[in-house]
Image: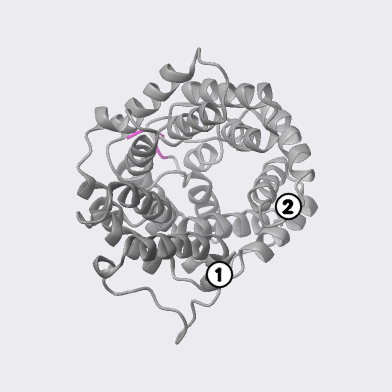
Amino acid sequence: NGASGRALSLLPGGLKLPADSRALSEAETDEYLSFVEAAYRSSPIADPILLANFAGSVARNPSTSIGYRIRAADICLTIASNTCDREIASACYLSLQYSESKSLEDERTQKLGLLYHTVFGSVDAAVQLAEGLIKRNADARPTSQGVVECGRAGYVFRMTGRPEQAFKALRLAREKALKIDAPRLAEYPIWQLAQLSLETGDLAEAMKWTKELHQLGESNADEAANTYIHAHMCMVAITQGDRREAERYYIKVQQALTGRRPLRTLAYAIGLELGVGLMDRRWTPGEDLLRTAIARFEQASAFCACDFLASRVGESLIRLGRIDHARALLANYITEKRREKADPSAFLSPVLVKLKLKSRK
């Protein structure tokens, strides 16, 4: 569409976002928000922090209509949760001045509350919002919105270290999607179920969900949209010790993510790179690769879902004989940074045992 075309023109000397969003008309605000959404999704050269800052400025502007403020906040928080930028996210969310009870009243505002509190704010508030979604949808007739809400709740439970609640919510989302014959909507909860099963160490369950996910992905011709499936398949192959498959899927991930800049994406990708490399017993990470991996881990590790990268960084340091460095890095992660309240994942636990570290704060 036009917004996508303009997104791809976000080059030095090309289209610029306005410095002051307050000067925009509603029509211009709508156009620029569409541009920002498209640029974030499709342009490897667009700066996600610049995009989040612009969307945040619209969300913070009290003279902008509330509909556009909420839309802008959704965009800002989605980007910030992937760039792990607490300052941008907090300024955006807190400017709307929503109470958590009020957030549940409107689908748009509860999504904002979930986005913010899961990664940056109060874990308890995120869980309360997620439990409210499940209560609202548990016995309701299946709808697309119900699938999305149960999937969101499952993600929150997974990110905050409540695997039993996460499994229940994600199975509910999958069931609702299948009842309304919406296989594309079913992909997300199935992917989350597969990831969660890997994290809890249930490989048989992980393979069941992975097979279902792979079958759904094969019916989708959009290779870019399937990148998250390729990344998951790479992680499964690493877990199974299948080096050839891990390398095959990592190449697909690497090709799809070339030029992408959100920190969470970069952290996940370098975790896979280390994971594939470590499958070769003779391999050791180069100093530049390890330095970059540690830097990304340090930047992302306080914002959920970093156990896999933590485990691969730890194993890399162990292989290089830098035991004290590995112990200090992972001890700080467990005691100070790790946001999840559950036990460390099946990826991380064996590394903590090697380092003789306690698994709880």
* Magenta segment main secondary structure: loop
Disc 1: which residue = 44
Q: Where on the picture, by quarter, is residue 83?
A: bottom left
Up-down: is 318 above or below 202?
below
Which SS class for mark 1? Answer: loop
**Mark 2 closeness class: few <14, some 14–19, many ≥20 residues within 10 Å:** many
Instruction: Find out whether the residues at labels 2 and 1 contact each other: C-beta distance under 8 Å.
Output: no
Query: Would you say residue 81 is visible in this rendering?
Result: yes
Residue 162 covered by magenta stretch: no
Residue farthest along the bottom direction in this orientation: 13
- At 47% from the left and 60% from the top, the residue drawn is 34
Nearer the observer, 358 or 153: 153
Which numbered circle lies on residue 246?
2
Residue range highlighted in magenta:
357-361
Q: Position of residue 62 (x, y in %)?
A: 19, 54
Q: Is residue 85 left or right of residue 305?
A: left
Q: Earlier in the sequence, mark 2 or mark 1?
A: 1
Which numbered circle lies on residue 59?
none
Viewport quadrant of the N terminus = bottom right
Q: Is residue 237 left or right of residue 78?
A: right
**Which amino acid is tagged 2?**
Ala
Query: Would you say residue 321 is visible in this rendering?
Result: no
Q: CA distance from mark 2 to mark 1?
A: 24 Å
Q: Position of residue 103 (x, y in %)?
A: 30, 33
**Which amino acid is tagged 1?**
Pro
- At 26% from the left and 71% from the top, the residue drawn is 20
